[in-house]
Image (cartoon, helix red, strand yellow):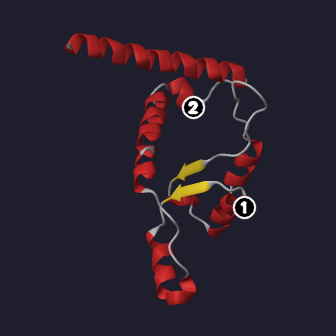
Amino acid sequence: MMLRPLLERLRLARSGGRARTRLDRLLGDKAYSSRANRSYLRRRKTKATIAEPADQRANRLRRGSAGGRPPSFDREAYRLRNTVERAINLLKQNRAVATRYDKRAVIFEGTVQVASIRIWLRDLTRSTNTA
């Protein structure tokens, strides 16, 4: 439901020129595997790496040749999602980030930056202690 509005408002800054509004690839979990999302991404010429849920796979196979071919899936690219998920989970360990008490986006961004610095410093001290 929220994929289309999110992608329509997306603006990726560049070092020069105007911001990009189209992604090259979208990595998503099984919740984004609807036919509507996949067709929307095809229209935007965005490669989708979204796992197919078991029920959708079973329905497609049950329909035989009328079910169509399975959607393309890049396993290696999908595994990269794990890195992003773990980083977000580390940020959410900070209560202020997880609950988002801050009303203004600028203040919340500062909260995320402070949490990121704390994570970086913690990892930095761990790596110097093991060396």
**Residue picked out by circle 1:** 43
Closer-to-camera residue (125/93)? 125
User: Can the viewer see residue 63 in this picture?
Assistant: no
Camera-nearest residue between 45 and 113:
45
Return the residue at label 2. Answer: 99
Residue 27, percent across and down? Answer: 53, 50
- Would you identify the image quadrant in which residue 54 lies? bottom left
Residue plotted at (70% across, 46% down): 22
Q: Residue drawn at (47%, 67%), measured in percent from left and top?
A: 53
**The residue under label 1 is which amino acid type?**
Arg
Horizontal side of 9 relative to 122 (left or right) equals right
- Give percent across and percent down for residue 104: 73, 23
Mark nearer the viewer, 1 or 2: 1
Q: Residues within 10 Å of mark 2 (few under 14, many from 20)?
A: few
Q: Which quadrant would residue 42 be assigned to in this image? A: bottom right
Residue 100 numbered mark, or none: none
- Which SS class for mark 1? helix
Whether pointer 1 and pointer 2 mark residues with C-beta atoms closer than 8 Å, the reply is no
